[in-house]
């Protein structure tokens, strides 16, 4: 009876792994990763016969290969691969990937909230100043932009929110260079915002610029050493930088 129960658990694990494959084929990478994480957690807790364990690990390794090779996954995370036959390392890596996506979702919600605040604001004078300041920033005229909004806190907040929202939108369109440009304009307004450096690091990750990503995340953590999302991203960047061709060891 106990052996039959174990075999049924194994069959259920394989069915759930197949569900991960279904989500991957539909390009639902985030839900695929979450389901895969749960499968691996259960594998760790399930005692199996040796032959079943070999079968399960073989299927897990095959799925990891499919996942790393999928276009949707690579568009989201780059050429980040998994280690075969190493559940703990794979689980830790999955946690980082999921955290990155959840931070992105939070970022998008906050961008919507910021845009609503701008739209609902009755301060038309501030809005006009904000638009002029943004035009100056777009021209690279930082001094003029600063002069326009220096005495208007509402306009300053508006410009900042516009730039961050633009950066998020460019990242969504897979245009990391333009996203970085918007985030750097926002740094003129708030140079000590660790979230901006974090966003720059993520955009650099999308273009496989591991050096730029590492420098940006280091700046984020210098501003706020307790920035948990920054630390997680730093671990990811370090891992991928060291595994990339010609990659250097990082601290």
Image (cartoon, rainbow, N blue to C red):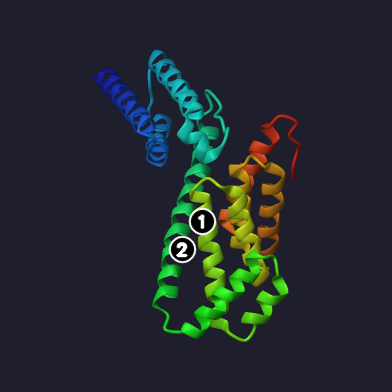
Determine the residue positioned at 61% across, 60% down.
183
Q: Is residue 138 left or right of residue 53?
A: right
Determine the residue positioned at 64% across, 39% down.
208
Residue 206: x and y, percent? 58, 43
Q: Is residue 4 left or right of residue 249?
A: left
Circle 1 residue? 168
Q: For the C terminus, which image quadrant?
A: top right
Residue closer to the observer: 60 or 151: 151
Residue 210 visible in rendering: yes
Q: For the N terminus, which image quadrant?
A: top left
Q: Is residue 11 left or right of residue 104?
A: left
Q: Residue furthest left?
A: 1
Residue 98: x and y, percent? 47, 44
Residue 224 visible in rendering: no
Image quarter of residue 209: top right
- On screen, residue 27 above or below 212: above
Circle 2 residue? 111
CB under 8 Å between discs 1 and 2: yes
Determine the residue positioned at 52% across, 34% down.
74
- Mark 1 or mark 2, earlier in chain: 2
- Badge 2: how crowded within 10 Å, few (<14), some, or many (20+)? many
Residue closer to the observer: 32 or 157: 157
- Badge 1: how crowded within 10 Å, few (<14), some, or many (20+)? many
Residue closer to the observer: 48 or 189: 189
Image quarter of residue 160: bottom right
Q: In the rendered picture of this protein, how many numbered marks are placed on residues?
A: 2
Mark 1: secondary structure: helix
Determine the CA span between mark 1 and mark 2.
Answer: 8 Å
Residue 216: x and y, percent? 68, 54
Determine the residue positioned at 55% across, 74% down.
131
Mark 2: secondary structure: helix
Residue closer to the observer: 197 or 125: 125
């Amino acid at each position: 009876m106990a052996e039959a129960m174990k075999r049924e658990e194994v069959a259920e694990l394989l069915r759930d792994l197949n569900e991960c494959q279904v989500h991957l084929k539909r390009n639902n990478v985030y839900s695929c990763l979450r389901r895969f994480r749960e499968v691996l957690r259960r594998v760790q807790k399930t005692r199996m016969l040796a032959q079943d364990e070999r079968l399960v690990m073989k299927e897990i390794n095959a799925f990891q290969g499919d996942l790393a090779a999928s276009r949707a996954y690579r568009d989201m995370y780059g050429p980040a691969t998994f280690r075969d036959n190493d559940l703990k390392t794979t689980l830790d890596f999955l946690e980082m990937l999921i955290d990155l996506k959840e931070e992105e979702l939070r970022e998008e919600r906050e961008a919507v909230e910021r845009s609503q605040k701008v739209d609902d604001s009755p301060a038309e004078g501030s809005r006009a100043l904000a638009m002029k300041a943004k035009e100056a920033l777009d021209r690279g005229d930082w001094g003029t932009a600063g002069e326009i909004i220096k005495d208007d806190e509402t306009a300053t907040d508006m410009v900042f929110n516009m730039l961050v929202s633009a950066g998020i939108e460019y990242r969504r369109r897979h245009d990391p260079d333009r996203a970085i440009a918007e985030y750097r304009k926002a740094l003129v307004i708030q140079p000590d915002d660790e979230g901006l450096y974090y966003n720059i690091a993520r955009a650099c990750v999308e273009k496989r610029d591991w050096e730029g990503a590492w420098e940006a995340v280091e700046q984020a953590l210098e501003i706020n050493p307790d920035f948990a999302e920054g630390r997680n991203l730093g671990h990811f960047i370090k891992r991928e930088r060291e595994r990339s061709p010609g990659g250097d060891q990082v601290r």
